[in-house]
Image (spheres, rainbow, N blue to C red):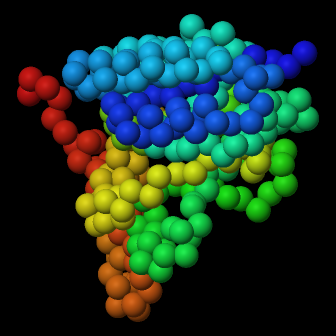
């Protein structure tokens, strides 16, 4: 018998993106036989936006042949919103989607088949780029420089074991949360920044569980050009630094040498004119500088 599936979508209130994603879910193949449950974890920052999301979910609940539910989490944090939805999910397989993706028609069947075919407790689906974006030279140049939008298209066969996660399209057996706990609410969007998926993957591997790759469970990621910028590059790497400090607890003795090394390598690759390595060093500079700032903050009240 096929295992029941719950699809959890955490959103900060991006109405247009959520409607686009729910529309793509309504058009996927296999929903009549699999009948997934969809849960929108509403993390909108104010009640006006939250009400709009709730009304949208109600509209789709009337249209769809499977349950479409709404869960409200007013306190900020993607992980907090996901954790709010997990206990009430009826599926033994929980699939997590970012609100700015769209599923491909065969996505649902691929998720279901993955857990029938392979022994892994966790699945990483592919996150694809649309063809028009793939062939746009300006977009490709900016992506190569900044790498601020996630795409996952590994050249691995279905079922290949991997050791990390990208949270925009992943599936996890509900029993995994009983073994290693919920998502870390100190990190991720709305809190320290990003890397909540990387931290969760580390706990999965440390517990002796496995992650498998499934390229056929594919989604398209939104190409938001505003994210291909210097300001977004800096924000992303600073967020990554704060997040990793929150769960790695690195000392100043480790942070400071890495910070100084990033300055030297940035200067060196700038002189050589190697743009890719220059931006890698620049990203590490923002990363370790954010760590340094957080680490040297005075406690409240001092």
In the image: residue 235, left or right of residue 41? left
**Splitting the image into 4 quarters, where does residue 256 fall?**
bottom left
In this rendering, the answer to whether 166 lies above or below 115 is below
| Front residue of 59 and 68 | 59
Q: Quadrant of residue 203?
A: top right
Vertical arrangement, residue 201 with respect to residue 290, above or below: above
Q: Position of residue 58 (x, y in %)?
A: 44, 16
Position of the N terminus, as image quadrant, is top right
Residue sitting nearer the eye, 90 or 155: 90
The answer to whether 27 appears left or right of 167 in the picture is right
Task: Determine the residue positioned at 28% across, 66% down.
Answer: 230
In the displayed structure, 163 sits above or below 178; it is below
Q: Nearer the viewer, residue 156 or 12?
A: 12
Residue occupying image coordinates x 89% and y 29%: 116
Name the image quarter holding the C terminus.
Answer: top left
Dividing the picture into quadrants, the one containing residue 142 is bottom left
Q: Does residue 79 appear in this view?
A: no
Please report the residue visible at 56 percent of the width from the left and 44 percent of the height from the top: 102
Find residue 61 and report its horizontal and vertical position in percent.
Answer: 52, 16
Q: Residue 171, position in %: x, y?
A: 68, 32
Q: Is residue 131 visible?
A: yes
Residue positioned most to the left:
302
């Amino acid at each position: 018998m096929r295992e029941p599936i719950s699809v959890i979508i955490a959103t900060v209130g991006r109405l247009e993106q959520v409607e686009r994603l729910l529309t793509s879910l309504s058009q996927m193949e296999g929903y009549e036989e699999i009948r997934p449950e969809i849960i929108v974890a509403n993390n909108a920052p104010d009640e006006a936006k939250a009400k709009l999301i709730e009304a949208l979910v109600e509209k789709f609940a009337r249209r769809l042949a499977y349950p479409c539910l709404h869960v409200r989490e007013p306190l900020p944090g993607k992980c907090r919103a996901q954790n709010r939805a997990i206990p009430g999910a009826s599926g033994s397989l929980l699939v997590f989607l970012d609100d700015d993706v769209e599923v491909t028609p065969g996505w649902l069947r691929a998720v279901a088949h993955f857990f029938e075919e392979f022994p892994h407790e966790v699945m990483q689906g592919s996150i694809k780029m649309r063809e028009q974006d793939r062939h746009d030279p300006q977009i490709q140049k900016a992506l190569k420089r900044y790498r601020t939008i996630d795409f996952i298209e590994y050249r691995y066969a279905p079922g290949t074991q991997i050791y990390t996660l990208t949270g925009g399209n992943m599936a996890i057996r509900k029993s995994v949360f009983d073994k290693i706990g919920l998502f870390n609410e100190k990190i991720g969007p709305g809190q320290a920044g990003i890397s909540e998926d990387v931290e969760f993957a580390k706990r999965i591997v440390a517990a002796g569980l496995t992650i498998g790759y499934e390229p056929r469970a594919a989604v398209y990621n939104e190409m938001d050009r505003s994210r291909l910028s210097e300001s977004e590059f800096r924000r992303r790497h600073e967020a990554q630094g704060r997040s990793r400090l929150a769960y790695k607890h690195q000392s100043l003795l480790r942070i400071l040498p890495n910070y100084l090394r990033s300055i030297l390598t940035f200067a060196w690759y700038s002189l050589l004119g190697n743009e890719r390595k220059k931006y890698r060093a620049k990203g590490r500079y923002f990363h370790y500088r954010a760590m340094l700032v957080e680490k040297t903050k005075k406690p409240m009240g001092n």
